[in-house]
Image: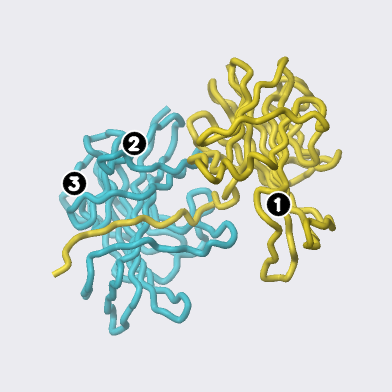
Chain colours: A yellow, B cyan
């Protein structure tokens, strides 16, 4: 008689499916920037998942035309930016374009930022502090605020909360202690692109921003 | 009557597309003592689904009698005691009859289980919990936590299978696990259910 009890628990149904997979960048007190891929509130990917994004990840400070070289580690990529400015990362080749059940071919673009010292956007989709060091951010897509958009914040204890941008595209992060906070939001745009031999009709953007409360 | 053909539980695969709403039954303090609600903590269902085999148990001298309302189950519970309620929810999915046993507990004083699937504190009032399946400790692959403060978290078990929940916010904490009985089948009120699921919640309040 087979008596052994196996209990494997269900994957979260949950409001949290929105944060399926992210790319985010953190900067530590020594200035080292680390790029992670995975779940912000769970675990970062390791090994091949990290290696395969190394060549297509662009990390830069002020100038997108001057990406910094990246070192590959087991669970992250790293760079050593100079100075204290904010760091930005972009990757549009984490996944190949895919065609959904509706026949629409899409591309995923990941835009990540570390820091909240500059009240301006550089990436297409970006969280922008309303002023340097503010807990309030404007979610910006190509220079325009995105109103009524769901934003997930992950706090230093890995707790997550769903927020929504207001009519001005702003969201205030409920800061409750020291440590790193990460913001996440998605946006789908009708943008025709050619990727390799594929015609893409829509682009799924994901913006993340990390900042540290000291 | 229940006839469970297997005690093996396996991964329940929910729809992978889109942010499906979580559904669970939970207990929370109320004017009447306690009430069970259905849906999601931040968005309770306005109407309960059809439920079978409603049972409640507490440690009061007299068994609490649950009152089924449109959107909740009122339970006249003794304050300060751990309370349980369990129901069976019939449903259909992909042509199959599915029975989901929804089991809820309020309070973290008792270190023993009453429901088939129950999260149990390792010590009275403690923050470390183990998962019991019919009295046997099993490891939870993950435990979802919702709070009345609006924060959510996923807990993963330590090497010994327990999960530890920090409680940084005041208010209600709700832990949820769910599982499927592998190859299980149950006949209830003359209907055979070829898929059997269990969902268990443990809720408790943290004072400011």
Q: Is residue A192 left or right of residue B23?
A: right
Q: Which residue is mark 1?
A: A108
In the depicted view, which residue is nearer to us: B81 or B88?
B88
| Label placed on residue B124 | none
Relative vertical location of residue A67 with respect to residue A192 in this rendering, above or below: above
Q: Is residue A141 left or right of residue A81?
A: right
Residue A203 is at least partly visible in this image: yes
Task: Point out residue B153 in the picture as x, y percentages from the top left corner.
Answer: 47, 41
The quarter of the picture where residue A36 lies is: top right
Relative vertical location of residue A103 with respect to residue A49 in this rendering, above or below: below
Q: Is residue A45 left or right of residue A169?
A: left
Q: Which residue is mark 3?
A: B112
Q: Chain of mark 2?
A: B
The quarter of the picture where residue B199 lies is: bottom left
Relative vertical location of residue B46 with respect to residue B79 in this rendering, above or below: below
Q: Is residue A33 left or right of residue B74?
A: right
Dot 1 falls on a residue whose secondary structure is strand
Q: How many other residues sit within 10 Å of disc 3, few (<14), some (14-19) or many (≥20)?
A: some
Q: How many other residues sit within 10 Å of disc 2, few (<14), some (14-19) or many (≥20)?
A: some
Residue at 31% x, 50% y is B105
Residue at 25% x, 64% y is B8
Q: Which residue is mark 2?
A: B164
């Amino acid at each position: 008689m087979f008596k052994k009890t196996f209990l494997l628990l269900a994957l979260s149904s949950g409001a949290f499916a929105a944060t399926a997979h992210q790319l985010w960048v953190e900067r530590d007190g020594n200035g080292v920037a680390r790029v992670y891929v995975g779940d912000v509130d769970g675990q970062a990917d390791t090994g091949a998942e990290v290696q395969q994004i190394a060549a297509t990840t662009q990390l830069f400070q002020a100038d997108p035309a001057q990406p910094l070289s990246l070192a590959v580690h087991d669970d992250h990529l790293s760079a050593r930016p100079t100075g204290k400015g904010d760091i930005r990362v972009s990757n549009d080749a984490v996944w190949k374009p895919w065609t959904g059940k509706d026949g629409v071919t899409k591309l995923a673009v990941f835009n990540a930022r570390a820091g909240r010292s500059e009240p301006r956007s550089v990436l297409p989709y970006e969280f922008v502090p309303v002023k340097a060091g503010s807990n309030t951010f404007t979610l910006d897509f190509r220079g325009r605020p995105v109103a009524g958009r769901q934003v997930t914040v992950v706090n230093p204890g890995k707790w997550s909360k769903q927020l929504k941008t207001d009519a001005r595209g702003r969201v205030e992060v409920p800061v409750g202690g020291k440590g790193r906070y990460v913001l996440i939001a998605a946006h789908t745009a009708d943008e025709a692109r050619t990727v390799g031999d594929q015609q893409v009709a829509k682009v799924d953007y994901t913006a993340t921003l990390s900042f540290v409360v000291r | 009557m229940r006839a469970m053909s297997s005690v093996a539980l396996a991964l329940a695969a929910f729809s992978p597309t889109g942010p499906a709403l979580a559904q669970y039954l939970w207990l929370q303090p109320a004017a009447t003592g306690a009430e069970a609600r259905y849906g999601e903590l931040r968005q309770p269902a306005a109407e309960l689904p059809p439920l079978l085999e409603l049972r409640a148990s507490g440690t009061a001298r007299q068994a609490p009698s649950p009152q089924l309302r449109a959107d909740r189950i009122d339970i006249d519970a003794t304050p300060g005691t751990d309370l349980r309620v369990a129901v069976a929810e019939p449903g259909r999915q992909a042509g199959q009859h599915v029975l989901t046993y929804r089991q809820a507990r309020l309070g973290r004083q008792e270190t023993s289980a009453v429901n088939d699937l129950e999260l149990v504190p390792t010590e009275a009032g403690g923050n470390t919990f183990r998962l019991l399946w019919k009295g046997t400790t099993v490891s939870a692959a993950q435990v979802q936590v919702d709070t009345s403060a609006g924060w959510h978290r996923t807990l993963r078990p330590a090497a010994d299978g327990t999960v530890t929940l920090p409680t940084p916010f005041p208010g209600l904490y709700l832990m949820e696990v769910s599982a499927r009985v592998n190859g299980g089948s149950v006949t209830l009120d003359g209907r055979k259910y070829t898929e059997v699921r269990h969902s268990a919640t443990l809720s408790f309040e943290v004072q400011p």
